[in-house]
Every structure is written in structure tokens, then in C-alpha cells.
Amino acid sequence: MTARQMVAVYGAYGHTGRFVVAQLVARGFEPVLVGRDARKLAELAQDHPGLDTRPAGVEDPGALDRALTGVAAVVNCAGPFALTAAPVIEAALRAGVPYLDVAAEIEANTDTFAHFAEPAREAGAVVVPAMAFYGGLGDLLVTAAMGDWTEADEVHIAYGLNSWHPTPGTRLAGKASAERRGGRRVRFTRGRLEYHGDDLPTLEWPFPEPMGLRSVVGEFTMADVVTVPRHLAVPEVRTYMTTEAAGGVGSPDTPTPTAVDEHGRSGQTFVVDVVVRRGGVERGMVASGQDIYAVTAPLVVEAVVRVLDGRVRCGGVASAGEIFDAPGFLRSLAPHITVASRR
């Protein structure tokens, strides 16, 4: 990696975007601050003197093209991704630069794979959606747990969050997804996404200590149901969420995250417990850390580093576990995320 490569961050002034900007600076990049609101970009630039600000709305292809001039890659942090992903990907393809995003929206990620697989392949481009806590981390953990397996009977990903204070962006993304689904819920079963109106079950999940046995909402479906089956033959992918976190993100009265340290992280902690089963054999991985929004930054920036220095296993539109060496990638996340085999 050459010093001070420029990386555009679309939605740089958002909650996650600010973490991504700071992580890019820490890794030796020069972030280019991009977004719709020129005033917010200017305010963010006061915290990062010398960084370029380039206002651009997704409805203006010319402004997006100007925003990506001279950059080595673009990271899209602006939701709802149902509205922003396609225009920014198209701009990245025109600019001939890699695109990565932090989308947790199931349908937006599905659209990226469906609509841009061929254009990205023809352009020799790299597009990595859902390179974030939801979608990316789970995919890496499942891929590492699978090891030499290329298929399994079922995958379970349990999210042990002690709380979830959603950002405004999370609420907007959730609203966009709910409207698109017509109020229905979604799950991945029998090898496909299925929309339904069933009530979600509540059950107990045995997280590793010190979290231990916790009540979780079953079929609390996250972006992993898109990323994992893209490259692994698994007909059942189920995700779970601790009840307190599900209640927090679902309540309109839950406040936004509050910083508790000098890095701007909230006091939220998490454990991601992955179990893969094939026949009578079970494998698993566990990851833990602090603040799901903050840890998205080292995830996506490490992905930027690996894409730019050529440490990828394929091109085109690909998920994290498909394009990167999962065990090596997970090791690189220390000290942001602690990863271990499940016992």
C-alpha cells in the first residue's frame, strides 16, 4: 500500500462514517469526505484539518463522478442502502475503483448481488457489500468455522448484545426494509429467502461464559442470510438476537448511542456465537468486542487494505468470506475484536 492513498467515504458525517474516517486516518489513508450535506461535511472537516470535502447527492451522477476523482476506493456508509448503494456502485464502476459498503439491509444486499454481478465482472471490478458487523463479520466467522467444509446442513449465528441503541441511520434503514416487505418478516430456509407473517419465537441460547444462557429472539434475521449462502452450500441460515437488544432497536423511545471513551465508542458489548452443523459434527467460532457500530470501521478498512494490495480470492461482487482469507482476516482484527474457536 502506498502512503496516503485517497479513499472516498460516502456518508462520512454519519455515526458509522465518522468511525470509518478515523480508522482510515489511523491506517495511513487520506479519506475524502463525501455526502449530500455540504454543511455537515464542513463540520466534520474541522475535526480532520486538510481533508477534502466533496458534496454529492446520489441523484446527481456528475457530482458522484467528481467526488470519486482520484480516489483508490469508495466506502459507502450512507443508508438506507436501498437508495444509495446502486448509484454509488455505478459511480465506482465508472471511476474504475473498488466499492465497499456497510449495508445491513437484506434486500439492498440481495439487489447488489443480483444487479451488479455481471457489470462488475465485465469491468474487472471488486464490489463488497455488507462489509460490516452484520453480514461481514458473521460470514467471516462462519467461513472460518467451516474450515475445509464447502457445505453444511445448517448455520446458526447468535448475537449476544447487552443493548442496542440504534442510530438514525439504522432506523431509516429498518423503515425502508419494512416498507419493502409490506410488514412481513424474512428468513432463509430450504435454500432461499422466505417472507412470512409468523410471530418470532423466543428461546434460550447458551452463549459462552461470562454471558451464559440468555433469552434470544429466534429468526431475528440479519444480512448474514445473504452473505453466507452466496458462497457456501447451506440450506438453513438462522440468526438470533438477545431479547434486550431486540427490544431496544424495536422501541421508538430508545436513545441513540452515547460515547463512553475517547474513541467515541458506546458502552455496548457483544458476543457473536456461530455454530455450523453437518451430519453429527458441530463446529463453531466466537467473537466479542465493544460497540457494533465502532467495530464496523476496522472491518471495512481492513477490507479496503486487502482489496487494494491484492489479497483477494476473487473479483466481481463478493461477500467477505468469499473474497478474503477468513482466518487471516479475523486475526487481523485484534485488538478491536477477540476471536476464538467455540468450545
Image (tube, helix red, strand yellow):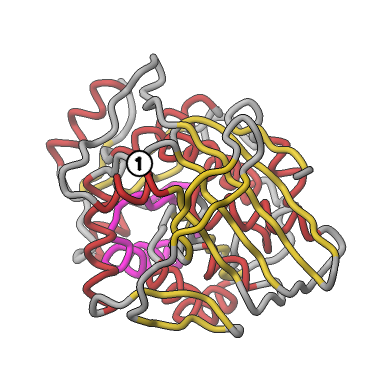
User: What residue sits right under mark 1 in the picture?
Assistant: 164
Kind of residue sitting beneath label 1: Trp
Residue 13 placed where, x, y %?
26, 38
Q: Is residue 309 left or right of residue 201?
A: right
Residue drawn where x is 44% and y is 55% of the image: 101
User: Does the image show residue 228?
Assistant: yes
The image quadrant that residue 122 belongs to is: bottom right
Disc 1, SS: loop
Instruction: State the quadrant of the N terminus.
Output: top right
Residue 132 placed where, x, y %?
49, 49
Which residue is nearer to you in this view: 54 or 264?
264
Q: Residue furthest left?
A: 39
The image quadrant that residue 86 belongs to is: bottom left
Label 1 neighbourhood size at 10 Å, few (<14), some (14-19), many (20+)?
many
Against 166, is 113 above or below? below
Q: Which residues are magenta?
A: 69-97
Q: Is residue 315 left or right of residue 87?
A: right
Which residue is nearer to you in this view: 14 or 24?
14
The image quadrant that residue 95 belongs to is: bottom left
Number of marks in picture: 1
User: Does the image show residue 98?
Assistant: no
Residue drawn where x is 56% and y is 40% of the image: 271
Q: Is residue 227 left or right of residue 149?
A: left
Which residue is nearer to you in this view: 129 or 289?
289
Magenta stretch holds residue 177:
no
